[in-house]
Amino acid sequence: MGSPQGLEDENGSSSSMRTAETMLRLLPMALCVVALVIMLKNSQTNDFGSLSYSDLGTFRYLVHANGICAAYSLLSAIVSAVPRPTTMPKAWTFFLLDQILTYVILAAGAASTEVVYLAYKGDTAVTWSETCGLFGGFCRKATESVAITFIVGLCYVGISLLSSYRLFSKYDAPIGDYKNKGGIEMATY
């Protein structure tokens, strides 16, 4: 049976805290799916030609990153929703995967922001003309997808902080048996 709200269960976390973490892990999944769908449907054809998200490698990376993060968010929400004791390997796995996916989604957002900026402003030094004057609908959808991706990035920063707090507050830092082989004096505390 579940524990009353605010009381801790056998693994040291309250059911309300577990519910909050599960919701925090589900939020980026929904946002990733929205950003993914917007970008997948992003194409425009006019008298000057056609433009699709798949024409730009950066936007393909954004789609893949959003898909991977959505899948991970769903799986991690399911795992965190199940009331089982947290072990050190589980805490480390969550910590590492949360960190990796935070950087993956931030990199996708940053790279895509550069492409959107160049589409709006162009770059005369490399003869890259602005595209948004001709493909305004494409640029608006790309901007929406990138903005949602940055919101996902903020969610992942919060998730990363939560998983790092969980890991480092429950478990001590690993202590190694280091031999001073280089003859350098080291302070010990």
Image (cartoon, rainbow, N blue to C red):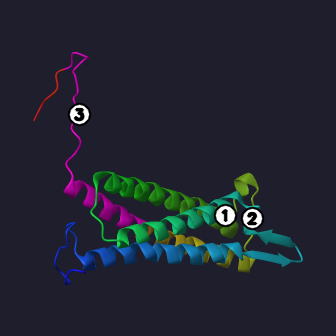
Q: Which of the two discs, 2 and 1, labels the residue nearer the N terminus? A: 2
Q: Along the polypeptide, which appears first: circle 1 or circle 3?
A: 1
Return the residue at label 1: 59
Q: Nearer the viewer, residue 156 or 16?
A: 16
> Residue 99, position in %: x, y?
41, 56
Vertical side of 47 occupied by 187: above or below: above
Which is closer to the viewer, label 1 or label 3? 3
- What's the amino acid at mark 2? Ser
Instruction: Give the residue drawn at x 79%, y 70%.
Output: 51
- Seen at 20% across and 84% down, the residue is 5
On the image, which quarter does residue 98 sit in? bottom left
Q: Are marks 2 and 1 in contact (CB under 8 Å)?
A: yes
Residue corresponding to mark 2: 54
Separation of residues labelled 2 and 1 (CA atoms): 7 Å
- The local secondary structure at tag 2 comes to helix
Measure how far apart labels 1 and 3 are at the Cα level. 44 Å
Residue corresponding to mark 3: 176
Q: Is residue 34 visible?
A: yes
Density class for disc 1 (Cα within 10 Å; few <14, some 14-19, many ≥20) is many
- Give the amino acid type for the residue marked by disc 1 in the picture: Phe
Q: Position of residue 35 (x, y in %)?
A: 59, 74
Q: Is residue 73 above or below residue 136?
A: above
The answer to whether 172 appears left or right of 52 in the picture is left
Is residue 67 a member of the stretch shown in magenta?
A: no
In this rendered view, identify the residue nearer to me: 79 or 118.
79
Q: Quadrant of the N terminus?
A: bottom left
List x then y, in percent, for residue 18.
Answer: 30, 74
Q: Which residues are magenta?
A: 156-184
Helix, strand or loop at label 1? It is: helix
Q: Is residue 38 left or right of residue 72?
A: right
